[in-house]
Image (tube, rainbow, N blue to C red):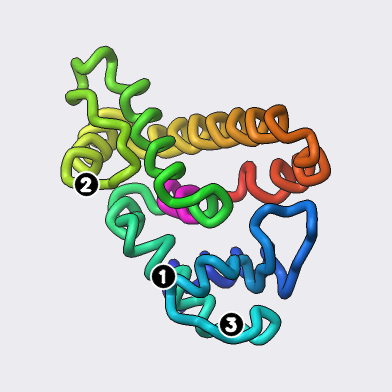
Amino acid sequence: MTNVDRLIDELIGREGGFVDDPADRGGPTRWGITEQVARAYGYNGDMRQLARATAVEIYRKRYWSGPRFDEVATIYPRVAAELLDTGVNMGPVVAARMLQRGLNLLNDQARAYPDIGVDGAVGPMTIAALRQYKARRGARGEDVLIKILDGLQVSRYAEITEARPANERFFFGWIDHRIGQA
């Protein structure tokens, strides 16, 4: 089992099987894949029947290689794992923006490396900034970056919940199952 296979297996374990909670705006979900995402990737069947193997392929394409978190993994594997998990729960663009914000906050007013756009697309500039950050901070830098990503994620959950009080039902679980997983 490769690292990404293990990460996806753990994600599916946290996400569970079929869920269709009327309070959850995600709608029918199986293996953590929403119906909307499944349809976008060509699945047209009943969500209760979505095969685990189909979910794994969607995870790989939409949440790992598509947003280029696989490239992040070559630099900081645990950061990539965090981005995968956050991307599944909040969307890969949101996860990538959190990485970009974190890198900008850590660049010592652009003395360590130039500021990068917070556009949610992990491209050459984001990868270059991450490499420069690692060269400067080493292994400890990964720990700090993960703490920043977790902090930004908690802040986003709080904002989502404050904007829609019905989400209070999910807030505990979001924090319990999503924060500190990398």
- Specify the farthest residue to the top: 109
Residue 158 placement (x, y as % from top left) = 67, 30
Residue 51 placement (x, y as % from top left) = 59, 86
Q: Name the residue at 46% across, 31% down.
A: 144
Give the main secondary structure, helix, strand or loop, of the magenta stretch: helix
Q: Who is closer to the viewer here, 76 or 85? A: 85
Q: CA distance from mark 1 to mark 3?
A: 12 Å
Q: Name the residue at 21% across, 47% down.
A: 123
Q: Amino acid at mark 1?
A: Arg
**Which of pointers 1 and 3 lies earlier in the amino acid sequence?**
3
Q: Which mark is residue 60?
A: 1
Q: Who is closer to the viewer here, 142 or 89? A: 89
**Which of pointers 3 and 2 lies earlier in the amino acid sequence?**
3
Residue 7 magenta-highlighted: no
Name the secondary structure under disc 1: helix
Name the secondary structure under disc 2: loop
Q: CA distance from mark 1 to mark 2?
A: 18 Å
Which residue is label 3 attached to?
A: 52
**Which of pointers 1 and 2 lies earlier in the amino acid sequence?**
1
Residue 46 placement (x, y as % from top left) = 65, 84
State yes or no: discs 1 and 3 in contact (Cβ < 8 Å).
no
Q: Which mark is residue 123?
A: 2
Residues rendered magenta in the picture: 78-84
